Image (cartoon, rainbow, N blue to C red):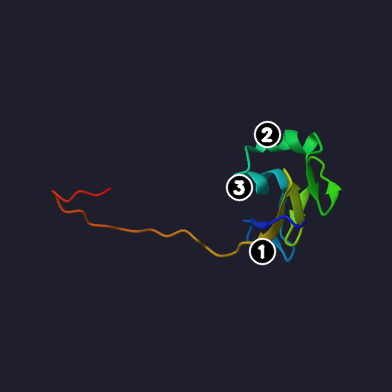
Amino acid sequence: MNAPRTLLTLKRNAATDGPVVEERLHKVLANAGLGSRRLLEERIQAGEVRVNGAVAEIGLSVRAGDRVELDGKLFVAINDSAEHAQVLVFHKPEGVVTA
């Protein structure tokens, strides 16, 4: 039975860091909202995380295309070089209610 795959994004910019983008496993998992970095380091050390089928170790870096398994869920690391931040400016006249 295949588990659903979810994407993990590598936030580093490939143009400034060279052709191969790598990021620490615990940081990538934390950015995905799967726990705090410290908690994820403990789970990696306990052998609860696998990368490309092998048990992960503390300090391991992941690259785009790596498959990460945690709690029976499969994640795939991808590069995220797009800038998703948007700034919205709204002039709120006096008496206008916003929520």
Q: Position of residue 5 (x, y in %)?
A: 69, 57
The answer for how far apart the CA atoms under marks 1 and 3 are is 18 Å
Residue at x-position 60% and y-position 64%: 81
Q: Position of residue 82 (x, y in %)?
A: 56, 65
Count up the numbered dots: 3
Marks 1 and 3, the one that precedes in the sequence: 1
Q: Position of residue 34 (x, y in %)?
A: 63, 43
Pick whichever, 14 or 70, lies toward us.
Answer: 70
The kind of residue tagged 1 is: Ala
The circle drawn on residue 14 is 1
The kind of residue tagged 2 is: Leu
Residue at x-position 63% and y-position 39%: 35
Q: 28 above or below 42?
A: below
Q: 85 above or below 38?
A: below
Marks 1 and 2, the one that precedes in the sequence: 1
Pick whichever, 18 or 67, lies toward us.
Answer: 67
1 or 3: mark nearer the eye: 3
The circle drawn on residue 92 is none
Q: Which residue is mark 3?
A: 31
Q: Residues within 10 Å of mark 1 (few under 14, many from 20)?
A: some
Which type of secondary structure does the marked residue at label 2 adopt?
helix
Q: Extreme right residue here?
A: 54
Residue at x-position 61% and y-position 49%: 32
| Residue 1 sits in quarter | bottom right
The answer for how far apart the CA atoms under marks 1 and 2 are is 28 Å
The kind of residue tagged 3 is: Asn
Q: Which residue is mark 2?
A: 39
| Residue 42 sits in quarter | top right
Pick whichever, 34 or 24, lies toward us.
Answer: 34
